[in-house]
Image (cartoon, rainbow, N blue to C red):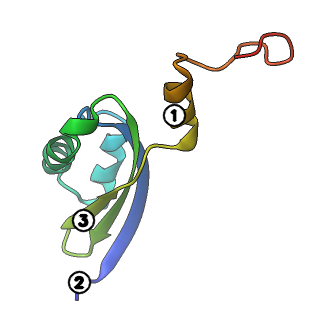
Amino acid sequence: AKEVAAFIKLQIKGGAANPSPPVGRIGSKGVNIMDFCKQFNARTQDKAGKVLPVIITVYSDKSFDFVVKQPPVAVQLKEAAKVQKGSAQPNRDKV
């Protein structure tokens, strides 16, 4: 079994991972950023544009695994209601 060095939680749009923040901060743990981006984008092509939580497990030998979760409920509710964003004035305007 490999020794776990760190867990990193991120929220990234499906199929749109690139080396800029927030993905860039995994480089400080020794992870190859481009390798992660290629794997993530390949695995999430079918969910392009949706915000997806990702849990990255970094091992002591600088290898990694990651698990892609379901989109947050708030994102799914906006999608189901067919609205771009929530109300700017929730006490006056209802969505």
Q: Nearer the viewer, residue 84 or 22?
A: 84
Question: In terms of secondary structure, where does tag 3 sit?
Answer: strand
2 or 1: mark nearer the eye = 1
Question: In terms of secondary structure, where does tag 2 sit?
Answer: loop
Return the mark for residue 44: none
Q: CA distance from mark 2 to mark 1?
A: 35 Å
Give the answer, above or below, for where 88 lies relative to 68.
above
Q: Position of residue 82 (x, y in %)?
A: 51, 19
The answer to whether the residue labelled 2 contacts the one labelled 1, judged by CB atoms less than 8 Å apart, is no
Q: CA distance from mark 2 to mark 3?
A: 11 Å
Residue with the mark numbered 1: 75
Image quadrant occupied by the N terminus: bottom left
**Type of residue at label 1?**
Val
Q: Nearer the viewer, residue 34 or 54?
A: 54
Q: Position of residue 2 (x, y in %)?
A: 23, 83
Q: Residue furthest right?
A: 91
Q: Quadrant of residue 67?
A: bottom left
Q: Earlier in the sequence, mark 2 or mark 1?
A: 2
Q: Position of residue 88 (x, y in %)?
A: 71, 13
Q: CA distance from mark 1 to mark 3?
A: 25 Å
Residue with the mark numbered 3: 65
**Type of residue at label 2?**
Lys
Residue drawn at x 39%, y 54% as measured from the top left: 69
Dot 2 crowding, Cα within 10 Å, few <14, some 14–19, many 20+: few
Q: Nearer the viewer, residue 34 or 67?
A: 67
Residue with the mark numbered 2: 2
Dot 1 crowding, Cα within 10 Å, few <14, some 14–19, many 20+: some
Q: Earlier in the sequence, mark 1 or mark 3?
A: 3
**Type of residue at label 3?**
Asp
